[in-house]
Structures are given as C-alpha cells and as structure tokens.
Image (cartoon, rainbow, N blue to C red):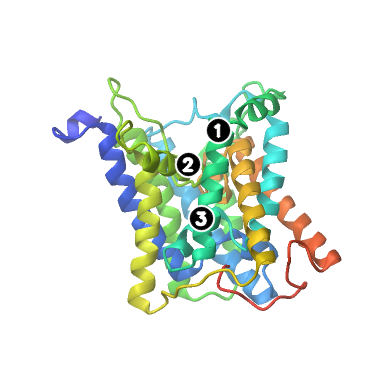
Amino acid sequence: MFETFGFETLTPVTASLYLALAIGVAFGALAEITRFCLRRAVVGPASSDKRQAGGIWLTALATALLGTQAAVSLELITFAEHRFLAADLPILAIVLGGLAFGVGMVLTRGCASRLTVLSGTGNLRALTVILVFAVTAHATIKGVFAPLRTALGGVTVPLGEVTSLAALPGGGLLWAALLATLALTVAMRSGNSVVSFTLAGLIGLLVPLAWVGTGFILFDEFDPIALQSLSFTQPTADALFWGIASTAIKPGFGVGLFGGVIAGAALSALVAGRFVWQSFSSPSETGRYLSGGVLMGFGGALAGGCTVGAGLAGLPTLGFSAFLTLGSIIAGAKLAEHLLNESGSVFGAQPATPVLQPAE
C-alpha cells in the first residue's frame, strides 16, 4: 500500500517517524489540556476529580474501540499476528509487570504518558522520572534485566484460538460497540463539559489513526514496519537509544511519538500560560519518584505496555492480554494507595489526602 501513495523520497520507517510526530503533537496538546491520565481516575485525591478524570479516559477509550474495530472490519488492518493476541498468554510477566507499573505510577503521581506530557510543561520531576523510566525499560527489553523478563515471560497459559473478544460470538465490532456504550454511559455521569468530552474523543481517535497509518498506509511488503499505535514504554526506550546512538540507527515511530508528545504539550502549555519550571522539593520526594520510575520502566517492559499502550491502544485490539495488563496495573495502583494510606509515609509520601500537586 505504501508505494501507491507515491512516497518516492521516503522509506516506510522515515514516513512512520513523521506520522508519529504528528500524532504525538496532537496527543501532547490534547492530553495537556484535558489532564488525560488514568492514575487520577483510579487513585485521585477527590471523588469529583476521579470522576472527571475517569470520564475523559473512558470517552477516549470508547472512540478508540469503535475506530479500531471499524478499521478491522473494513480489513484495513489485522491483529492476527499481534502480541496482544498471542496463543500463549505470559500470565506471570503480565501480572507482575502490571502490578509494578501500577505501584510506580502512584509513587510518581502520574503514569508514563502523563509524565511525558508534564515534561513538556516545564516539570523537571516528570522529566527526571521519564529518563529513569526509559533507562529501566530499555534495560528490561534489551539489557541486564532481559534474562529475567524472558524467564518470567516463559510462564504461559495456552489460550488456543480464543485469544480475544473478537473470537467470541458476535465478532469484534459488536463487542467494541458494547464496551464503548458501557464506557460512554459511565463517562456521561462524570460531570465533564462538552468541550472536554470532544477533546477526549479526539484523543481516542488517534489510536486507530496510528494503527491504520502503520498497518495499512505505510505497509510495504518489501520493507515492513511494525503495526503500532499510541504507547510509551517502547517508544521512550527507542527515543533514549536513538539519542545515544543516532549515527548508527534510524529514528522511527517511537522517536517521533515521544518527541511529538513533548512538543505538543509544550506548545499547549506555552500558549495557555501553563508552562512553569518545577523541580523536587526534598531528597525523600526525589527517592520516591526515582523508585516509581524504576518500577514503571521494569513493569511496563515486563507486562508489554502501560496505561496507554496496553490500555487506551491495547484494549481496542480486544486481546485478553491487554485486559489482564490494564487490570493488573489498576490493582497495583490500588495496592499502592492502600499501603500509602496505612503507613502515612513511604519514600516521603504525602498523607492519604494530599494537596494536589503539579506532578499529577
């Protein structure tokens, strides 16, 4: 399909860089405006804030579900060979990785996507965590922690041919419609404005745009690229590796997405007057954030995704592994919230009902 669009001077990899850059800018700006973050919906400091954050996230999920499965039904893309639909479910890696990521995002007061967005708004705490996250994720994917990831990933549960909801009676589009309806029903009770719902819906549409872009428009059987959408674990690690060895490798989708998100968030914050330089306030706070970054990097790489990669973009594949990953992340976040509330101080944590801070 790639050749029919007349990209004579671009390779699929380079074209995916530009595609991801555009999608990243859009996501960064929209996420900065809406404060898009699943963590706030799960362990937010106030019930009203949790409802609004949840409404934003669920609205984005609804449009991502419908758009992605519509593309599948039109045979523009297929997830038949995607890891989310693997016949052998790496249950131990997913559960442990998801729990670790969930705990980490509570310690850092933001998931990987939120912290990437905050990095573009002048938040040096978030930027520091993202750097630690990227190093740890890369070490888990290809470095010193890779043997552990491989060993844990070897513990699997066979799913046979039923690896997703699409394999159940009714097919993918029906299940996507049911899930989207449920998500929107809950979201409509969140108290968000029409503008917020609209912006959230646009965030969700970026998911199928990326799937179709990499899996259909840029598909070249002679020079294939991976089918990809919004995610932050692998792209952040890719951006780090490219920054270190740019003369040896070509930048691709991950580098474009990461850079685009930061640029989009920075542009949005600057225009709206929300760009503010911020940093750590104490050594204990620094320790907590760095620990959270390590847990998120290890957990995201081990589980194969974050709240966006396995959640917002993963659930629309309807693969059971994506649902398990997101469920494990949420369980980890709730566990961390409980432990923080019980202890009152973990790595210098705030009390159970802390004052809302910028790194959220």
**Image quarter hosting the C terminus:** bottom right
Q: CA distance from mark 1 to mark 3?
A: 19 Å
Is residue 195 positioned above or below 177 on the image? below
| Residue at left offset 57%, top offset 30% | 85
| Residue at left offset 73%, top offset 32% | 92
Say what amino acid the circle numbered 1 marks. Ile
Report crowding for label 1: few under 14, some 14 to 19, many 20 or more residues within 10 A (C-alpha). many
The residue carrying mark 3 is 113
Q: Nearer the viewer, residue 116 or 187?
A: 116
Q: Which residue reaches farthest right?
A: 342
Residues at discs 1 and 3 in contact (Cβ within 8 Å):
no
The residue carrying mark 1 is 141
Is residue 102 positioned above or below 212 on the image? below
Report crowding for label 3: few under 14, some 14 to 19, many 20 or more residues within 10 A (C-alpha). many
Q: CA distance from mark 1 to mark 2?
A: 9 Å
The residue carrying mark 2 is 237
**Image quarter hosting the N terminus:** top left
Can residue 168 be seen in this snapshot?
Answer: yes
| Residue at left offset 45%, top offset 47% | 230
Q: Which of the 4 image quarters holds residue 221?
A: top left
The spot of residue 107 in percent (x, y) is 68, 59
SS category of the residue bearing label 2: helix
